[in-house]
C-alpha cells in the first residue's frame, strides 16, 4: 500500500467516524412543523403545530384576498369586540430582550372570512421587525365571531394591533 492510498484510507475512516459522531449527536426529530409565509418579502415562519390550540394556515396578503372577494370595511374597535378566541399566547421575543427594547407594536391589515377566520394578513406598521414573526403567528390563529350585515355573515376588512410590553413592566 503506497502513501497516497494509506492516506486515503485514513481520510475515509476519519470522515466516516466524524459522520457517525455527527449523526449520534443530532437532535431527535421534532413534531410536525409547518412553514407559514404570511407576508410578501419576509422569510417563512416555522410553526410547531403540536402546541394545543394552534391552527395556522398558509395565507395570502390582505391585498390579495381583498381583491378576490367582496369585503366590508369595519373599524378596529368593532373587530376587537368580535374577537372570541386567541389560541396562541404570545411571548416576548428573546431578540427584543437582548436588545433591551422596552416594548413594541405591530399593526396588521386583516381580512376575516364569513366564519370569522383570518384569511389574509399584511403588516402595515411595526415598531421593530423583531416583533413581526411572533405577532403574525398569533394573529393568524385568532378566531372571531362572524360579522353580520343585514342578518348575513360577510367577509371583513379591518386592522389589528398587537402590543408587546417588556416582561417586568
Image: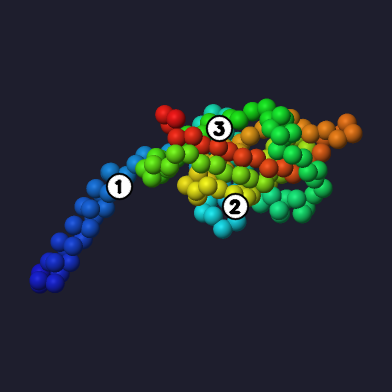
Q: Nearer the viewer, residue 162 or 9?
A: 162
Q: Quadrant of the N terminus?
A: bottom left
Q: Secondary structure at mark 2?
A: loop
The residue tagged 3 is: 88
Task: Tell me the tag on residue 140.
Answer: none
Looking at the image, which residue is at 88% across and 31% down? 151
Q: Is residue 138 above or below residue 67?
A: above
Residue 165 in the figure: left or right of residue 13: right
The CA distance from mark 3 to mark 2 is 19 Å
Residue 86 place in picture, x, y as percent: 60, 30
Whichever of callouts 3 and 2 sits on the residue coming sooner in the sequence is 2
Q: Residues within 10 Å of mark 2 (few under 14, many from 20)?
A: many
Res 48 seen here:
no
The residue tagged 2 is: 39
The CA distance from mark 3 to mark 1 is 34 Å
Q: Nearer the viewer, residue 88 or 100?
A: 100
Q: Quadrant of the C terminus?
A: top left
Residue 119 in the figure: left or right of residue 103: right
Q: Secondary structure at mark 1?
A: helix
Residue 28 place in picture, x, y as percent: 36, 39
The residue tagged 1 is: 23
Amino acid at each position: 500500500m503506497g502513501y497516497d492510498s494509506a492516506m486515503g484510507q485514513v481520510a475515509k475512516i476519519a470522515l466516516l467516524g466524524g459522520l457517525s459522531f455527527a449523526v449520534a449527536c443530532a437532535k431527535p426529530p421534532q413534531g410536525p412543523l409547518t412553514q407559514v409565509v404570511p407576508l410578501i418579502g419576509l422569510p417563512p415562519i416555522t410553526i410547531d403545530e403540536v402546541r394545543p390550540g394552534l391552527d395556522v394556515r398558509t395565507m395570502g396578503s390582505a391585498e390579495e384576498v381583498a381583491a378576490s372577494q367582496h369585503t366590508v370595511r369595519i373599524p378596529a374597535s368593532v373587530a376587537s369586540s368580535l374577537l372570541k378566541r386567541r389560541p396562541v399566547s404570545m411571548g416576548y421575543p428573546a431578540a427584543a430582550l437582548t436588545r433591551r427594547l422596552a416594548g413594541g407594536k405591530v399593526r396588521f391589515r386583516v381580512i376575516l372570512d364569513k366564519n370569522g377566520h383570518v384569511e389574509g394578513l399584511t403588516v402595515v406598521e411595526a415598531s421593530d421587525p423583531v416583533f413581526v414573526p411572533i405577532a403574525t403567528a398569533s394573529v393568524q390563529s385568532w378566531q372571531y365571531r362572524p360579522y353580520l350585515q343585514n342578518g348575513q355573515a360577510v367577509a371583513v376588512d379591518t386592522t389589528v394591533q398587537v402590543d408587546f410590553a417588556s416582561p417586568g413592566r
